Image (tube, rainbow, N blue to C red):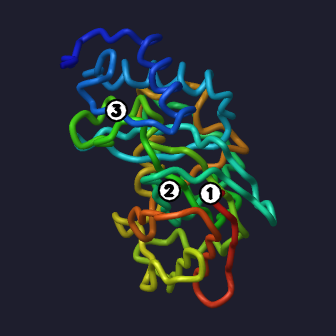
Amino acid sequence: MTSMVATPDVHALAQQLYSLRRAGSQVATGELVSVPVALQDAIDVQSQLSELEGADFNAWKVAKSPGGDPVAAPLHPYLDNLPRAMLPWRRGIKIEVEVAVQLCEALPVRKDTSYERADIEAAISNAYLGAELVWSGISEGGTISFPAFLADRLGNVGYVRGPALPLAVLQPDSSNSLKLRLNGKIAFDAAGQHPTKDPLTWLWDYANNHSRPATTLRAGSIITTGSLCGAIEVPRPGDVSILLGNETAMHFALT
């Protein structure tokens, strides 16, 4: 069994994760060539994996580790409001309906001061309905090793950006009715709400992460902020239909 190591083989692990993703195959955490312990090592692997996949570094997801550390990963492939968007289906894939924001101003790393929530709001020009596809080459996901899951781009295997939303959806405690249909069948029908009840929590935390790369959170970046419905497994290929509130809808397919 592979042991967790202080200095993982960054290149070898990135290559292994890349191969697993291309094949749609999964292995247990113990079958990885090495398992990082430090988040920075995981980020180094993630960077190499993203380059192997040709990821665009202008679309990101933000999250938080079990230890409370703000983390991020590129969204790839990223499909921008296409009327007939299609992404590949694979066994075990899950969907998360989310709100994404676009930055009109950069949020550079601040060493001596912190961003306030109002600073984050002021840097946002647009909000969008979106859908993230989540699947990992690690069969346990992040339940055994969160750093390994972070290395695997936090399980992101695609993102579809939908129509614009009013910026009011970013206010704390905001919620809207959310319906998710998979091949015409209801998979979620309840109020959609961010897990922290504030859609900007993880972006705000990540902006105040002094160790994040200086190139992150640039003007024009798209940042998806966290699921409104948890992670829902998609059992087979087909049509995905999302309705937030009474009017904002998006449709795409997993093939």
The residue at the point 72 percent across, 69 percent down is 164
Residue for badge 3: 27
Give x and y (percent) for residue 234: 48, 64
Alpha carbon separation for disc pair 3 and 2: 28 Å
Query: Is 68 left or right of 216, judged from the image as shown?
Result: left
Query: Is 64 left or right of 177, judged from the image as shown?
Result: left
Q: Are marks 1 and 2 in contact (CB under 8 Å)?
A: yes
* Label 3: which secondary element: loop
Label 2 neighbourhood size at 10 Å, few (<14), some (14-19), many (20+)? many
Residue for badge 2: 225
Query: In this view of the protein, can residue 114 be seen by the observer?
Result: no
The residue at the point 19 percent across, 17 percent down is 3
* Label 2: which secondary element: strand
The residue at the point 42 percent across, 70 percent down is 229
In the rendered image, the vertical position of residue 51 relative to residue 184, given as above or below:
above
Viewer-proximal residue, 173 or 52?
Answer: 52
Mark 3: amino acid: Val
Mark 2: amino acid: Thr
- Mark on residue 101? 1
